[in-house]
Image: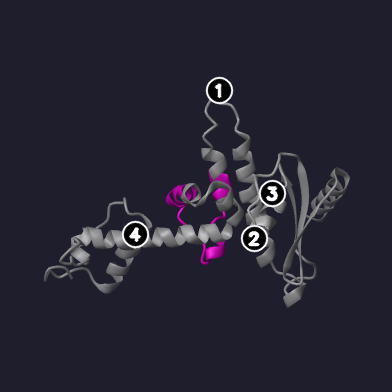
Amino acid sequence: MADGIRGPGLAATQRWMQSAILDPYAPGPYAPGDVVTASRRLSARERLRIHQQGYRLRLAECMRGLHPGSAHLLGREIFDGFALAYLEEHPSRSPTLAGLSDGFAGHLSRTRPDSAPGAEREPWIDLLIDLVRFERVFSEVLDAPGPEDGAGDAPPLRLFLACAPVHAYFTEVRRGRDPGPPAPRPVRLAVTRRDYTVVTRELSRAAYDRLHSHQEDAA
């Protein structure tokens, strides 16, 4: 209720609040003043904006937690800009925060600034996208079922191709160090888990091809 005017019921208010926070620019059935009361210093819209901004800041913090290497590579301000642009276009439908960045690498690939006709391809964008992809694989392997808890017969295993040793860069950042961007070179990785610890091993082309063929045969 705002200014003594009867507002929507509780369920409708909750649905409106959720919609207004998830998509601040979408038209809704109520104006902010129909649901939110103003204060002496802030209008109803300004008070609602605090919740909208707080929600996005929390999501940006979660994205940095899921992608510490990428946040280090870009710097917090630029990373948050990329992350919030992704979330604006792809609001999370995951029941857990771990799934928040499922489509982040794909979004970066589709919106890369060097994709215009005639534009020169920027190697740093390839590095960023592969780093984001690796961080996603790292999280998925960490959370996958496995023999440690009896949920799987074998440890999870993911094969990964990258344009640079993003795994080494990621590890350095997680250890609190300040590495420079890795030099580009083709990298083939096996990412698995042992006793709840993610283990990454760089493979030769032959070893990678054998494992890849084995996975295809088993699929």
Q: How crowded is mark 3: few (under 14 residues within 10 Å), some or many (20 or more)?
A: many
- Furthest-front residue in this view: 178
Q: Residues within 10 Å of mark 1 (few under 14, many from 20)?
A: few
* Residue 44 visible in the current orientation: yes
Tell whether 62 sits left or right of 3.
Answer: right
- The numbered dot on residue 52 is 4
> Residue at the spot x=61%, y=50% of the render?
132
Q: x and y percent of residue 30 in the render?
A: 22, 59
Label 2: which residue? 174
Q: In this view, does 115 lie to the left or right of 189?
A: left
Secondary structure at badge 4 equals: helix
Residue appearing at x 73%, y 47% in the figure: 165
Marks 2 and 1 in Cβ contact (< 8 Å): no
Q: Which of marks 3 and 4 is in front?
A: 3
Please say if the residues under marks 3 and 2 sit with CB atoms less than 8 Å apart. no
Image vertical order of residue 176 relative to residue 26, above or below: below
The residue nearer to you, when weighing 16 against 114, is 114
Taking depth in this image into account, of 216 and 169 the one nearest to the observer is: 169
